[in-house]
Structure formats: C-alpha cells, structure tokens
Image (tube, helix red, strand yellow):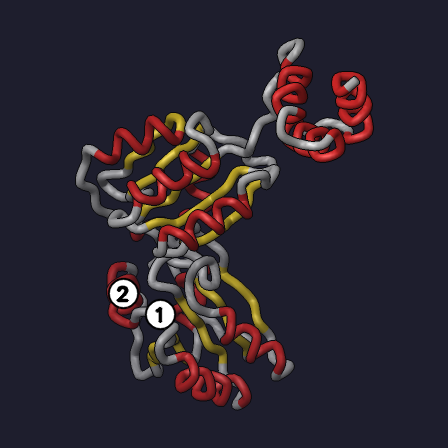
C-alpha cells in the first residue's frame, strides 16, 4: 500500500484530489485520507470511489457531504468534530478545494474559531493548463467561471481586458462557443489563447490559436468534458509613424482639443500632456 495510517493533529485538512487520472493523487493526500478521524467531501460517492481505487478503508469513520447547497447545515457538524479535538479531512470532487470549488466558508469558520487549517496540496486544472498551454506564466489571473448571461459575461470581460497577466477561466462545454465569441469581441479577435479540455484524461486535448480561430473551430464541433480557457494579456501595438497624428485629426473633427487629446492618449497609452501639445498644434 502507498499510504501510512498515523495519528493526525486536530484540525481541518484540505485534500486536493485528481482532476482525471486517479494516480495523480499524492502519497500525503492518501495518508491524510487514511488517518483523519472524520472525512468530508463535496461528493461522497466520488471520494469513496477514489479511496477504493487506492485501498484506503473508510471503516467506521463518519463521511459527511459538504457542498454549496448544504453548507449552512454541514458546517456546524464539522466544527463540532474539530472542537472535540478531531482531525477532519475535506476533499473536493476534483482538484483543489476553494479553487472554484466549495470550502471558503468552511475555512473561514474554522479560522474564526481559532482552530488550525492546513492543506495536502495536489492537482489543479488551472495550474495544469498553464503548464502546457504555451502562454506566459510569469503572471496569471484566475477568473473562475464567467456569468451565464451574455451582458454580465461581457461586462466581466471588459473589466479584465487590460489585466497585465494571462487570464484563466473555467467553462462548461455548453457555453464554450458563446464565451469564445464574447472574448473575441471584448478582448480582441487576435489575442492568443488556448482551450484545454479533459486534462489528464484519455481524451485530453489542447487547442491553441487566436480567439477568432478558436471560436470558429469550436463552433463546428460538439464537445464534452471539463474545460479551461487561457487568454494572453493585452499587448501594446507598435505605433507606425503618423498614427497618433491621424487619430488626433479624426478626433478633432468632433471633439474639443482637451477631449480629443484625452481619448487618443488613452487609446495609445501615451502621456496625456504630450498628446495635448500635439493636438494644440494641429488645431491651429
């Protein structure tokens, strides 16, 4: 067996579980699952199946369901076990607890009660996607799931448009095409991106291209599975000689010197005072 049963200190242990391949679980995660006094899970059937695969017995230990829909009722039970000096292991259905999965309110409640919280780290769909997508990883911003309503989705994308980092999203296959379409519209059709599907599973697929290319590709397909979308940060466009002057002349046709300068300075990310001086010369 690849786990060790040993006494755990009292406290809450967040356990990361595989996002696909069962063998991706860590030996420490197996140790925690084998040793904890109480087990809790987003999906108890999934955790039981994972434990069976690795030969970790449940025995007579409590196994408590904890998810978004029963948190108010389940949290007090888990807190009572912790206050009684028990060790409690909590596992997401797949991936790392709290990363687009339940657990934040539980962690907050345990911390407020002055009890310890620790983690047995492991798989994460976001980190897995970042490592193989071919996009910059020096900075990234995890935005979770976008809103399902088109207007709200576009509003969130507008807020994120100029974030100086690779954008990371989780998405449903049912909404993938709609999200790619809105991303192309709001973030720019030529932005490099990647769609990572069924990571670590048999039919793992990584599609790379611009947002326009990916939208067209997936519009013609019927797909299933878990999806991560990564989008490169906004890149400054090199200015050709005369671009700023042409933009100012056009803006001055309908705007005051001040407003025209402000609009062009923002559009080209240039010092406002410098653009204003150019606008004054052109207006004369």
Secondary structure of the residue carrying tag 2 is helix
C-alpha gap between disc 1 and disc 2: 8 Å
Label disc, if present, on residue 46 of the rendered structure: 2
* Residue 91 occupies quadrant: bottom left
In front of the other: label 1 or label 2? 1
Compare residues 148 and 106 and report the one nearer the observer: 148
As drawn, is 218 to the left or to the right of 33?
left
* Residue 160 occupies quadrant: top right
Compare residues 181 and 17 and report the one nearer the observer: 181
Residue 78 visible within the image:
yes
Q: How many marks?
A: 2
As drawn, is 113 to the left or to the right of 227?
right
How far across and how far down the image is residue 1, in percent?
33, 59
Name the image quarter holding the C terminus.
top right
As drawn, is 246 to the left or to the right of 132?
right
How far across and how far down the image is residue 109, in percent?
55, 79
Q: Is residue 129 above or below residue 120?
A: above
Compare residues 35 and 149 and report the one nearer the observer: 149
How far across and how far down the image is residue 57, in percent?
30, 72
The residue under the point 41% across, 79% down is 71
Q: Residues within 10 Å of mark 2 (few under 14, many from 20)?
A: some
How far across and how far down the image is residue 159, in percent?
55, 47
Pointer 1 and pointer 2: residues touching (CB < 8 Å)?
yes
Q: Residues within 10 Å of mark 1 (few under 14, many from 20)?
A: many
Label disc, if present, on residue 42 of the rendered structure: 1
Label disc, if present, on residue 97 of the rendered structure: none
């Amino acid at each position: 067996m690849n786990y060790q049963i040993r006494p755990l200190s009292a406290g809450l242990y967040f356990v990361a579980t595989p996002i696909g391949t069962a063998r991706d679980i860590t030996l420490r995660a197996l140790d925690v699952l084998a040793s904890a006094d109480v087990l809790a899970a987003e999906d108890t059937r999934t955790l039981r199946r994972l434990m069976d695969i690795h030969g970790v017995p449940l025995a007579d230990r409590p196994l408590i369901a904890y998810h978004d829909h029963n948190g108010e009722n389940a949290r007090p039970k888990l807190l009572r076990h912790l206050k009684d000096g028990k060790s409690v292991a909590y596992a997401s259905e797949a991936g790392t607890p709290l990363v687009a999965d339940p657990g934040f309110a539980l962690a907050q409640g345990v911390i407020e009660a002055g009890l310890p919280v620790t983690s047995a780290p492991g798989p994460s769909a976001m980190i897995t996607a970042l490592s193989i997508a071919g996009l910059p990883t020096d900075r990234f911003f995890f935005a979770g799931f976008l809103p399902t309503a088109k207007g709200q989705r576009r509003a969130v994308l507008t807020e994120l448009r100029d974030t100086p980092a690779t954008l990371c999203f989780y998405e449903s296959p049912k909404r993938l095409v709609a999200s790619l379409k809105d991303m192309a519209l709001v973030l720019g059709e030529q932005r490099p991106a990647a769609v990572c599907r069924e990571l670590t599973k048999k039919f793992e697929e990584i599609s790379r291209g611009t947002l326009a290319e990916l939208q067209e590709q997936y519009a013609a397909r019927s797909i299933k599975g878990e999806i991560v979308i990564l989008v490169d940060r906004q890149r400054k466009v090199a200015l050709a000689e005369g671009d700023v002057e042409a933009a100012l002349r056009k803006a001055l046709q309908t705007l005051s010197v001040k407003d025209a300068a402000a609009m062009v300075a923002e559009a080209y990310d240039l010092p406002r005072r410098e653009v204003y001086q150019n606008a004054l010369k052109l207006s004369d």
